[in-house]
Image: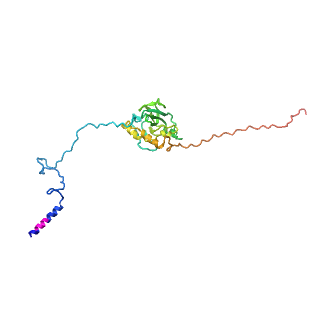
Amino acid sequence: MEIMRSGTLALVLLTAACSAPAGVAGVSTNPPSPRALSAADPTVEGTATPGPTFAAAVVPPPGDEPVRLPPPKVSRFRYVYPVKGCKTTYERKRLVLPKTTIWAGRGCAFVAPVDGVVREVNVQNKWKPSTDQGAHREGRYVTVLGEDGVLYLGGHLDTVAPGIRPGVKVKAGRLLGRVGNTGNARNMASNLYFAVSWPAPPQYWWIRRGMVDPWTFLDAWWDGNRTFSPRAAMLAVRERVGTLPACSVLCAGKPQEPKPKPTQKPEEEEPKVIVPLNVEPARSGQ
């Protein structure tokens, strides 16, 4: 009888040992359950306030405002934002052409974005809705060939600044004209048509109106990164499409109906004079 009890007890102990988590004998391997410290806890000494207590939140020490470091120099050229002294907004995506519309108040200053030479100046607003000629859509405009080899166009100008003519050297920030809504923007709010491309003969007007998306560079110049250059992007596009690519978007104007030729009045014929032949003269005295 005693032998059976001992065997049964040994079997129970063996089963319990097998079902318990492995570890050091007498030490539980289960993670301790979280609990709040309280006055009733025998491990807390000298606690006068009943109820749970928690550690206080860490408050960072006061410090100065963060210092903004200047951006790294990424080219030898220096740029400025092309509209000076006015609040502006502009599109950051391509709608039809690789250019952007910078919305600004009428009369705001359009300035040279980089050192360069004035290449083209158009002081006449030749655009007409009846013809919609592509070469005239920017209205009054100025182009600058930057020292970086990039051509910059500012169009829809209200006026061109005095002294701005082809061949004039300009520094970044030099006044080129005033924002307006000439050209095909005449029924829109005043804005600056801003385009980035490369120099080409005037008959290739679709090149100067924009070949490189400009908003990434406008963002950088506005934010203070004065050396972020569009030169590499321009060279990449020119390498892909060629120096004088054919026009592919918004090329033709409106078809013109042939003008009727003025009708000419028929010439009036002079009355015919009939001269009788072999008429004998009248004799007198008969």
Which quadrant of the structure image shows residue 276? top right
Residue 249: x and y, percent? 49, 44
Residue 91: x and y, percent? 41, 42
The answer to which of 162 and 10 lies nearer the viewer is 10
Vertical position of residue 25 compared to residue 156: above or below: below
Give yes or no for residue 7 being in the magenta stretch.
Answer: yes
Magenta residues (range): 5-10
Vertical position of residue 49 compared to residue 221: above or below: below
Residue 100 visible in image = no
- What residue lies at 12% left-to-right and 67% top-to-bottom? 7
- What residue lies at 48% left-to-right and 43% top-to-bottom? 241
Residue with the most extreme bottom position: 1
Q: Where does the C terminus fall, quadrant-wise?
A: top right
Give yes or no for residue 2 being in the magenta stretch.
Answer: no
Which quadrant of the structure image shows residue 262? top right
Residue 248: x and y, percent? 50, 44
Residue 285: x and y, percent? 90, 32
Q: Where does the N terminus fall, quadrant-wise?
A: bottom left
